[in-house]
Amino acid sequence: MRYVAIGCCLLALIACKREAREVRPSPAVSSVLGDAAAESGLYPGGAPAHLVVRNPYEGNAYAISEGQRLYNWYNCSGCHAGGGGGIGPPLIKKDQRDWIYGSEPSNIFDTIVKGRPNGMPTWGGKIPEYQVWQLVDYVRSLNNLEPKAATPPRTDSLEPKTSTILPNKPGAPRQ
Amino acid sequence: MNQSMWHTSSGSNAAHIQQLAVCFGLLLTTIFLIVLGIALLTLRRRHRGIEQEPLEGSHQPSPQTEDRLQTVVSVATGLTILILFGLTIASVSVGKIVSASVAPPASMTIQVTGTQWWWRVRYANDDPRLVLDTANEIHIPVGRPIAIRGNSDDVIHSFWVPSLQGKRDLIPGRTTLEWLQADRPGEYRGQCAEFCGLQHAHMAFWVVVEPPDRFKTWMDHQLQPSAEPVDDQTRHGRDIFLKKACILCHAIRGTDAAAQIGPDLTHFASRRTIAAGTLANNKGNLAGWIADPQTIKPGTRMATVPIQSAEMQPLIDYLESLK
């Protein structure tokens, strides 16, 4: 009986989406959003059949941690800082009504890919789509919009440093 | 890139390590053989009458045997202590020599930053025009002490060129110093020697030791901006590089690409390998690497960039023109 229970627990792990590490993105991950992202709830002539675009990495801890790495690599932090905002608006919202262009995965995806007025660059074609989804995952996790269990307390690696190369000067710190 | 089973040292520090290894090896093998020989001798020598007359608790060896045993055991213990002490002194003193962080007046300083899973190499210079950024390949002149300033971007790595120097850990947030000197020209493989994640085994580099004049030619060439495309094909390739995700991570001096996240590709075609010693640098391997890096090196930080098949040939033609 005990072995059956242990076996069931192990089987349950197979279905654990949080732990899945898909290092090789499949082409199926790519999807064209088109008009899926709606920034307004008003539709002339009644709401269309809602097209739901889901983030393929939703609730995946690895994707969130990759998103955090890419957030610094692609210099999102240059404008949005650690999420508190700077040149760009804060990504950690005090109030969920503060999202200018919506907080749904498809909205954030559009914001990154298409850019937004007043400074948000168009990243489409520059950041591969699967990485955009990872960034979407991370930005949403900053606002507790991803399952808490999937949000790691730190990145996979150590906290990245801004400067790693020291100047080669006599007075430069040794050791 | 000849690799032999038996590594011979090509640098003064590695020579010390090699001497130590040979000394340990010979001495310990000799001792092992002697002990084994004695053990075999005792097997051959049949003990008289031990089966017929089991030793009793009250059995006492004769005073002569007692004396002899005492001498043998004392001498053996004394010898063991002496040998171990000698080996300890030899080991510690070699360790002190090779790990000396203060180099003899070094002819130059190279900053090596380990990062998952490749090596960022920067030739330091007080004149910023002479600072050179490259990756996964270190050229040094023969017979000159070189200071290596090690650092890490993420986790602990270890810089190791067995033919030139012992291992030195690269620790995030800390600068480790070591020096090496190559006494013979050649190409020496280096390898990360501290487990650092999924692709630790594919984190290699080459140290190319050249005569000083050839080194200077290499250095002068590397300091130049990248080669201008000469025909439409490579020009098209450059446009693709600058238009795609490549530009977000890589730098090619002389173009708009200036990102410092991935390896500097300014003189990419002059390097021997792709992806930190994973593949030989040729067009076929490069196309495979760009099209699907995650199959060649699962987990690598190189992104899978969607590139249409018609764009691949110009792109690799351009990259392989960056001599």
Image (spheres, rainbow, N blue to C red):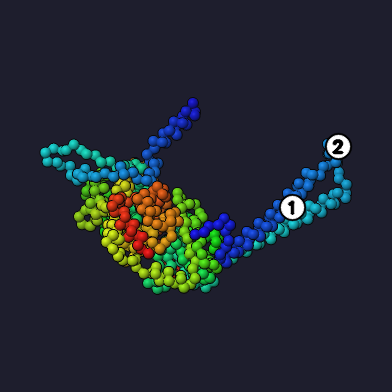
Residue A88 falls left or right of residue B264: left
- Can you see residue B201? yes
Q: Is residue B160 visible from the viewing direction of this image? A: no
Query: What residue appears at the point 76 percent right and 49 percent down from the top-left corner?
Result: B38
- Amino acid carrying label 2: it is Glu
Q: Secondary structure at mark 1?
A: helix
The lab-note entry on whether marks 2 and 1 share a chain reads yes
Q: Which residue is disc 1 drawn over?
A: B34
Q: Is residue B195 positioned above or below B217 on the image?
A: above
Identify the disc placed on residue B53.
2
- Secondary structure under tag 2 reads loop
Give the residue at x 41% y 57%. B281
Q: Position of residue B51 (x, y in %)?
A: 83, 36
**Residue at 44% across, 72% down:** B216
Task: Give the vertical position of A159 relative to B164 (above or below).
Answer: above
Pick the front one: B230 or A30: B230
Q: Residue furthest top?
A: A1
Whichever of labels 2 and 1 marks the residue nearer the N terminus, that label is 1
Q: Give the residue type at disc 1.
A: Ile
Q: Do the CB atoms of the residues marked 2 and 1 lie less than 8 Å apart?
A: no
- Residue B253 percent coordinates (x, y): 34, 65
Number of residues whose C-alpha sits closer than 10 Å to that of mark 1, classed few (under 14), some (14–19) or many (20 or more): few
Q: Residues within 10 Å of mark 2 (few under 14, many from 20)?
A: few
Residue ID at (26%, 52%): A124
Residue B311: x %, y % from top left: 29, 54
- Give the numbered dot on residue B45: none
User: Where is residue A126, by image quadrant?
Assistant: bottom left
Quadrant including the C terminus of chain B: bottom left
Label 1 marks a residue whose chain is B
User: In whole angstroms, how far apart are the C-alphas of marks 2 and 1?
Assistant: 31 Å
Is the residue B50 above or below the residue B219 in the image? above
Q: Where residue A27 appears, x then y in whole percent?
A: 31, 44
